[in-house]
């Protein structure tokens, strides 16, 4: 494998191929423009060398395992031909709690769409031909580990499961799922096709065999069944065929986080995201050596037990809980601040690391801990200078930035964006209505061996300061706008994000250099992304400025979007002429 990425999901990479172990719970690609990123989208926009990735195959959202992408036109042509001509060999593993007869089971049928499902019909009925060979390779105890996730999802307790190997010779949508159900052994968790409810659909693409597009060498890629927590061998070091050690617990949703977080560089991310992970109304974050639980009510016995399990799984020193309320300003400070729930108390200040950058956190500052984890990927964009495929942060042709590169962080909070930009060599100006947050930001600079004296920290109202900076003819290469949904100041009065965002963009444009980048973000959950983007771009056009490039991104994959847990975060990067 070449390249510098430490992503655990990577199996193989060279000049032509990128092979990954896709976690369950993540689409292969985004199903719509404003939905959560699929693995393809997330990878393609993450690294400049992956900008030209091409999708060759797809796996269902709840299916994990080997997924290959082409990096070159040659690879695209070669792999497309190999899949079309059925020269690629695929092996899957599945779990079922239904009896399966011994020996090989060969299924040949045609698949016909019926609403959101597919149904199997005899070959003479017409439709797309599908052929799969199944065989039982062993049994596993599905009750090993925590069954709380399955119980939360409404599953009855599952005992011993059969481990079945499936070899499809065709590649139809839902093929294995439909034909397994047809033969009386639906996949565990596949409720669409009659499987027993569980935390995920237990289907895993274990092995893929193909010929290298350039050398013609036969290559076999194997994906280990993802562990539920960190501390296990990385992708490519475990025999993927060892399905007898596939367990249903604890919390399969953790495998998604483990696959996409570089363990040496990041130890802070969301572990449980409400209904998307089977726990409506409950959110848990890892913050370095501590965990933080958020919910609208005190912890239930099941939540407390799961939190204790997570403390053990991550070797956390302790876990805190915070009651979510819309009336934080009226609550006593001790009620608004996170309270110790399990383990040891945290010091007044402690640190976490994200993308190799350190940040100071505290559980003693009302409802704020010091960093919003849902902006992690956007902070990384400032750190790397790579906004997305074909969208460098700076317009310079080389990888570096001009020495005079300047960034204005208009709602700085504890200066997370500013620290990342400064680490990459930019001179930053951090603006916030709170001196306390700016002082916290200066400590974040010092934590990362950055001298705060080399950067500007401005205290006051953002709209007022934008006017003052424009009068002083200050110009910035990047302007970052991530305002609270509601604020109030003496200078500007009441600010409501849905009503006043256009006014904010209008005030920011005079300080943005021609060809500079405007970052606009909001977590106003009820504001549709189409309306948010339209409002931002209308303000740009009204100022006789032109959008040259646009890159929209929702919340990161550890904040998964689902019907039960809709998206709330909307962010867009715009290069403006």
Image: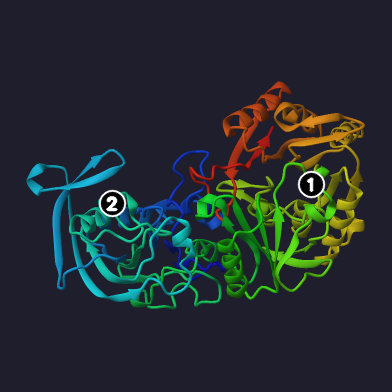
Judged from the image, the secondary structure of the residue bearing numbered disc 1 is strand
The quarter of the picture where the C terminus appears is top right
Name the mark nearer the viewer: 1 or 2: 2
Q: Is residue 79 left or right of residue 358?
A: left
Q: Is residue 69 above or below residue 457?
A: below
Residue in the picture at 20% in, 66% down: 134
* Residue placed under numbered mark 2 in the picture: 193
Judged from the image, the secondary structure of the residue bearing numbered disc 2 is helix
* Separation of residues labelled 1 and 2 (CA atoms): 52 Å
Q: Is residue 203 left or right of residue 298?
A: left
User: Sequence order check: which comes first, mark 1 or mark 2?
Assistant: 2
Residue density around tag 2, few if under 14, some if 14–19, many if 20 or more, within 10 Å? many
Quarter of the rendering containing residue 500: top right
Quarter of the rendering containing residue 169: bottom left
Q: Position of residue 237 (x, y in %)?
A: 44, 78
Residue in the picture at 70% in, 27% down: 540
Residue density around tag 1, few if under 14, some if 14–19, many if 20 or more, within 10 Å? many
* Residue placed under numbered mark 1 in the picture: 407
Q: Position of residue 396 (x, y in %)?
A: 68, 48
The front one of 465 and 225 is 225
The front one of 379 and 373 is 373
Tell me if I can see residue 403 in this picture. no
The front one of 432 and 397 is 432
């Amino acid at each position: 494998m070449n390249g510098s990425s430490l992503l655990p999901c990577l199996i193989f990479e060279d000049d032509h191929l990128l092979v990954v172990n896709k976690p369950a719970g993540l689409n292969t690609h985004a199903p719509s423009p404003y939905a959560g990123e699929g693995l393809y989208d997330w990878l393609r926009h993450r690294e400049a060398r992956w900008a030209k990735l091409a999708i060759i195959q797809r796996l269902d959202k709840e299916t994990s395992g080997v997924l290959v992408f082409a990096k070159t036109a040659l690879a695209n042509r070669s792999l497309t031909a190999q899949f079309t001509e059925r020269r690629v060999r695929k092996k899957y593993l599945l779990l079922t709690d239904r009896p399966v007869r011994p020996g090989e089971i060969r299924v040949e049928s045609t698949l016909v769409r019926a609403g959101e499902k597919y149904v199997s019909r005899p070959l003479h009925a017409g439709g797309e031909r599908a052929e799969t060979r199944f065989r039982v390779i062993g049994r596993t105890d599905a009750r090993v580990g925590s069954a709380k996730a399955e119980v939360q999802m409404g599953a009855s307790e599952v005992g011993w499961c059969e481990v079945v190997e499936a070899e499809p010779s065709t590649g139809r949508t839902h093929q294995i799922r439909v034909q397994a159900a047809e033969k009386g052994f639906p996949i565990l968790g596949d409720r669409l096709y009659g499987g027993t409810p569980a935390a995920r659909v237990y289907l895993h693409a274990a092995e893929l065999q193909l010929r290298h597009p350039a050398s013609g060498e036969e290559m076999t890629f194997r994906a280990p069944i993802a562990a539920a927590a960190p501390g296990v061998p990385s992708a490519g070091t475990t025999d993927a065929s060892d399905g007898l050690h596939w367990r249903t617990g604890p919390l399969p949703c953790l495998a998604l986080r483990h696959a996409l977080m570089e363990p040496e560089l990041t130890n802070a991310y969301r572990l449980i995201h409400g209904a998307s992970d089977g726990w409506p109304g409950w959110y848990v974050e890892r913050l370095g050596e501590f965990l933080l639980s958020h919910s609208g009510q005190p912890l239930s016995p099941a939540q407390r037990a799961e939190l204790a399990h997570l403390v053990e799984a991550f070797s956390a020193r302790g876990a805190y809980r915070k009651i979510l309320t819309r009336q934080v300003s009226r609550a006593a400070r001790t009620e608004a601040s996170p309270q110790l729930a399990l383990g040891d108390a945290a010091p007044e200040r402690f640190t976490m690391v994200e993308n190799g950058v350190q940040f100071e956190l505290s559980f003693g500052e009302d409802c704020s801990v010091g960093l919003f984890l849902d902006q992690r990927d956007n902070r990384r964009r400032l750190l790397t200078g790579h906004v997305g495929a074909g969208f460098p942060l700076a317009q310079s042709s080389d990888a570096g930035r001009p020495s005079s590169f300047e960034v204005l962080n208009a709602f700085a909070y504890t200066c997370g964006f500013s620290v990342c930009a400064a680490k990459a060599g930019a001179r930053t100006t951090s603006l916030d209505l709170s001196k306390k947050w700016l002082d916290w930001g200066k400590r974040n600079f010092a934590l990362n061996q950055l001298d705060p004296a080399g950067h500007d920290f401005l205290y006051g109202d953002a709209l007022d300061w934008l006017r003052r900076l424009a009068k002083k003819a200050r110009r910035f290469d990047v302007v970052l706008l991530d305002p609270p949904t509601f604020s109030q100041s003496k200078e500007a009065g009441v600010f409501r994000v849905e009503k006043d965002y256009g006014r904010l963009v209008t005030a920011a444009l005079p300080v943005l250099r021609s060809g500079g980048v405007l970052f606009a973000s909001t977590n106003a959950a009820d504001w549709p992304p189409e309306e948010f983007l339209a409002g931002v771009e209308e303000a740009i056009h009204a100022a006789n400025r032109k959008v040259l490039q646009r890159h929209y991104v929702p919340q990161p994959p550890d904040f998964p979007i689902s019907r039960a847990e809709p998206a709330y975060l909307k962010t867009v990067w715009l290069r403006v002429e």
